[in-house]
Amino acid sequence: MEALKLYNIRFTGLKNGFHDFDYEIKGDFFKAFDGSLIQEADLKVALTLERKTNGLDLHFKTTGFLTLPCDRCLQAVNVPVSDESELLVKFSANPAESTDSIWYLPTTAWEINVGQYLYETLSLLMPLRVSCEVGESGHCQSDFETLMQKYDGSNADSEESSDVDPRWEKLKNLKLN
Ligand SMILES: [Zn+2]
């Protein structure tokens, strides 16, 4: 995928030791994947890659926010996220089957692309529930509406209770006698 070219790492040119890569990930990144539930984001990913003779250790540190609709009022909410993850790449003449966190590559490999890995890892940061309370405003539009309804309702209630029908008062007296 063209959009993921940025996430190519040619490790053959890297000396053994630590190398830093920084990525800024926004909505465009997620839109490159069909069916992504994340459409807007502002994330910084700091990748520290350790090049070894027989593999690579990649440590990802993510901070920023995902922009998601509030479950209740559908307003866009900036949900803060922070995460760390590890990916190991092992070179082998007979590569075993790769897993989510360990990739086995033939010894002839010379580059990797971490775009798909980042997409899958970052998608897991989506909270089960999204609420305006975690965003900057801290107030949900639907709470405001509930409050308005409550205010209208309690107003009507207090009118009823303070204006007691005088005929009821008379009935009460009758019963007591
Ligand atoms: Zn809301």
Image (spheres, helix red, strand yellow):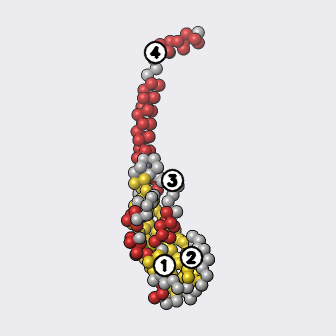
Q: Amino acid at mark 3?
A: Arg
Residue 16 vertical placement versus 66 (above, below): below
Q: Which residue is mark 4?
A: 166
**Neighbourhood count class around disc 4 (C-alpha, 10 Å): few under 14, some 14–19, many 20 upward:** few
Q: Amino acid at mark 1?
A: Ile
Q: Quadrant of residue 144?
A: top left
- Looking at the rendered image, the disc whose residue lies closer to the viewer, 1 or 3, is 1
Q: Which residue is mark 1?
A: 112
Residue 121 vertical placement versus 175 (above, below): below
Residue 145 vertical placement versus 138 (above, below): above
Among the two numbered marks 1 and 3 on one chain, the one whose residue lies closer to the N terminus: 1
**Neighbourhood count class around disc 3 (C-alpha, 10 Å): few under 14, some 14–19, many 20 upward:** few
- Looking at the rendered image, the disc whose residue lies closer to the viewer, 2 or 4, is 2
Q: Secondary structure at mark 1?
A: strand
Q: Residue at x 45, y 29 (%)?
A: 157
Q: Which residue is mark 3?
A: 129
> CA–CA distance between discs 2 and 3?
32 Å
> CA–CA distance between discs 4 and 3?
51 Å
Q: Which residue is mark 2?
A: 103
> CA–CA distance between discs 2 and 4?
83 Å
Q: Quadrant of residue 154?
A: top left
Q: Quadrant of residue 96?
A: bottom right
